[in-house]
Image (cartoon, rainbow, N blue to C red):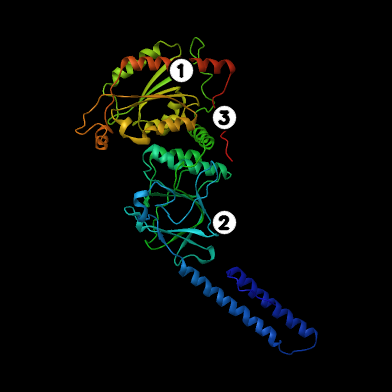
Amino acid sequence: MSVSCLYSPKLSIFLLALCVSLFTLYHIQSLHAGTTSSPPWSFVHQWKRVTNCTQEHESMAEKLRQSVTFLPLKDLRYADKALQGHTWFMSSMYDTHEEGEVQYQQFPSESSKRRLLCLKGKETHDGSWNSYALAWPEALPFNATLLKGLTFVSYNHYNYDNIWHGLSAMVPFVAWHIRNGCESPSRWILYHWGELRFEMGPWLRTLTEATFGGAPYTETFEGVDDGQPLCFEKAVVMRHNEGGMSRDRRTETYDLMRCKARMYCNVSSEGRIPEVNKQGLPVIGMTLFMRTGPRSFTNESAVIGIFEKECAKVDGCRLMVAYSNNLTFCEQVKMMSLTDILVSPHGAQLTNMFLMDKNSSVMEFFPKGWLKLAGVGQYVYHWIASWSGMRHQGAWRDPNGDKCPYAEDDRRCMSIYKSGKIGFNETYFSEWARDVLDEVKIRKLEEAASKTIASTSACACG
């Protein structure tokens, strides 16, 4: 009998059971042969080899446990390159990335050599004190707790309260969910700069519940000591938001979230083509989604009056005025489902645009100074319009505003311009509204004639 000393507790138990069985069979055979002699020394020798191998297994397991190395989640060597490459968060790991798909890490997997992800630390102010490691299932770190089910580990360079930044962190998980048989997580672990976060904002939490079919459980590490590791039966890590996703994959993801959100809020996912006015013309919903405080209109009654006047000129146009800070998630979903033209200042509330019917229009407004100083971040709502199938109809940028004591292209001026108020230009706003209303009217008439449905009634997944 040849015994191989490959480490496995299950193998050890199997070999011991096999030896006991062979020992018993040998004695039975000896009785039938009429002999009571002792078993040959060769058999005893094999028994000792099995015992020694079991001891070697136990010793090897202990060595593997001791050799698990925890590294800081926040690698300070890359502090000035946090948004570049695979660095900063779990810097020793590389992502799995197929063309057009999300960038992610999965544990266990071939790339992790079938090892599990383990996390340690509860730091909420310095991510370099939180750490991660990989361990084989048979040799978890000392005092580790193994959590069953699927764990989503999210790294967000920004936060989970702002609905745009929160949505950006959620999107890749939804894409993974779609491509993996609609598998949903047992828990979420949220990191910001490697620091633990224990809550999603209400809007994001509700969207997550709607999309994954259950309220998200955010791991709080309650009852876990700072030095006690948590290991995960299966974990998926995202740290690049939508980075690397093709437009088609993004559109598929937004389609699912729109459909799930409408279903969750008992809003029809069939679009609004059947909705007509008394003259039988399709209703055009124009919504002014207003802000209070930073980037609000200096004279909102004048702005409302301009769009109200242009809407009144178009049969079937219906104007709604709403404020982003006093609506529940489902109220926003319902409002967006009734909106064909969304008129709003630049801000997180525009994230709701993906909840409109596809091909709906967006009109965006900026304070003074943003074009020169705000960087690429000012175009995020152009991007989400493209990804979710909407039509971004352009942006109006106020040429007037607070004065900056430095040159207008000085980066220090952005701190003044960032939260500036937005004025208005009646001539420009009127012509702009008129053009967009005419375009939407023609499109909706064509859709009504062809009985086109804007969105499907089933939420496709998997």
Amino acid carrying mark 2 in the image: Glu
Identify the residue position indicated by label 3 in the image: 457
**x and y percentages locating residue 270 in the rendered image:** 54, 26
Mark 3 or 1 closer to N-term?
1
Q: Earlier in the sequence, mark 2 or mark 1?
A: 2
Residue 284 is labelled as 1
Tell me the CA gap for discs 3 and 1: 21 Å
Residue closer to the observer: 192 or 281 = 192
Mark 3 or mark 2, earlier in chain: 2
Which residue is at 54% across, 19% downward?
274
Task: Please state the horizontal and vertical placement of residue 305, each as a whole percent of the image.
Answer: 32, 15
Hey, what amino acid is under mark 3?
A: Ser
Q: Is residue 162 above or below residue 89?
A: above
Q: Is residue 369 left or right of residue 232?
A: left
Quadrant occupied by the N terminus: bottom right
Which residue: 57% across, 43% down? Answer: 179
The type of residue carrying mark 1 is Ile
Residue 413: x and y in percent read 24, 34
Task: Give the residue pinned by disc 2.
Answer: 110
Crowdedness near tag 2: few (<14), some (14–19) or many (≥20) residues, C-alpha within 10 Å? few
Query: Dot 3, how many residues are within 10 Å of its Cα: few (below 14), some (14-19), or many (20+)?
Result: some
